[in-house]
Amino acid sequence: MGTSFDKPSLVQRVLPLFRGFDGWLVGVVLLLACLGLVAMYSSGYDHGTRFVDHGRNMLIAGVLLFTVAQVPPQRIMAMAVPLYLTGVALLVAVALFGITKKGAQRWVNVGIVIQPSEILKIAMPLMLAWWFQRREGQLRPLDFAVAGLLLAVPVGLIMKQPDLGTSLLVLAAGLSVIFFAGLPWKLVLPPVLLGLAGIGVLVVMGDAWCADGVRWPVLHDYQQQRICTLLDPTRDPLGKGFHIIQGMIAIGSGGVFGKGFMAGTQTHLEFIPERTTDFIFAAYSEEFGLLGNGFLILCFLFLVWRGLAVALGAATLFGRLMAGAVSMIFFTYAFVNMGMVSGMLPVVGVPLPFISYGGTAMVTLGLALGILMSIVRAQRQPPQAAKPTL
């Protein structure tokens, strides 16, 4: 009988798996997931199985989050180089013999059809965090140059597909790691000021540069059209400008309090294109108004703040850089999506985390949060229980 009392119960065996999880982080993620389910039901209940599939994707992301959180950061770091090299090799394969859909060559068949650029959303910051961890305490300007090269290769291959949205996300994730690694401000400010000056010139010269027959070097035609449409959506209100115009109408018509759940006319009369994916923020804004938007933005800001707090408390440089990169990934996703839907940024096809429909994006978010939670658990682990570095 004594052995039956000594045998741990199922609860006793399972509880250690959740030990060290950040309650605030879990709470805000669950809150965003609930908001996503509400928004998806309203905008996609009559759109096939979108609502059910969205819930399934969230469960998959949750399982991934929990599984990756059990892996120590040292083991995650060991995957950086193989994952990066695999991702770049697949991008080269896409460039050589990839599958083209709707004018974009972004997929490759490796037994199943995959989009390799999605791998780099996680592999890129992992690789750079690994690189700077290896160079800790002896960083030189050359090390930042190597990091820039490691970033430029996949970003260039993704832009060539072309896929401006994904290349922007990979670029933002990589640049955040380089910045948090200690990139001097004298190297940060010049490109920022140059970019702001370029935006100012573009706004002033927009009418002349967007005139019929004017061709911009470097950019693809569709990229030029998106920028010109951003500057003046009324140039083609029933064509290229339709998305932005309808998105702004929906956001404005929501007012302060919104029209109410399931009561959005722009949404349910199908004026909003892609209302369950890239433009779901417009549908959400119409029904929940300025107050709903403010609450959603506060949730994202809290998520980013909590991630940065984890970065500050991480025990290793790798942990600090990855936590910072994951935080900026969420910031970039939310900022770009809300900006493009509200007409402040070009339409680049970036989903809104936890709110927009999309299995691949949800998997990426689950992996990112799993890495963040792994760093939290390592940070809270008693010193005597810490595992040796590989």
Image (tube, helix red, strand yellow):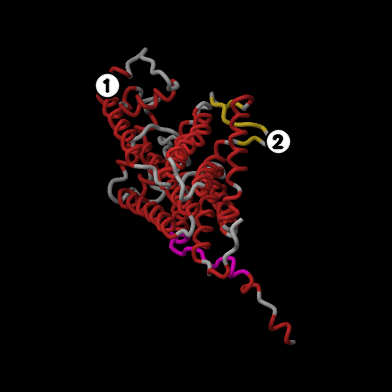
User: Where is residue 238 shown, x and y percent of the image?
Assistant: 38, 25
Answer with the quarter of the image where residue 81 lies: top right
Q: Which mark is residue 249?
A: none
Which stretch did the figure color magenta? 14-28
What count of labels does the image hold?
2
Q: Residue at x 36, y 45 (%)?
A: 285
293 vs 34, left or right, is left
99 or 172, nearer to the observer: 172
Please give the residue where the numbered disc 1 appears in the rendered image.
205
**Most common SS among magenta residues:** helix
Magenta-span inclusion, residue 193: no
- Image coordinates of residue 194 in percent, x first then y, are 31, 30
The quarter of the picture where the C terminus appears is bottom right
Look at the image and tell me whether residue 106 can be seen.
yes
Q: Looking at the rendered structure, which numbered label has been put on residue 111?
A: 2
Query: Residue 61 location, x and y as percent?
Result: 56, 52
Give the quadrant of residue 269. Answer: top left
Task: Tell me the kind of residue under disc 2.
Answer: Gly
Q: Secondary structure at mark 1?
A: helix
User: What x and y, as percent, mark residue 362?
Assistant: 53, 47
Categorize mark 1 by other alpha carbons within 10 Å: few (<14), some (14-19), many (20+): few
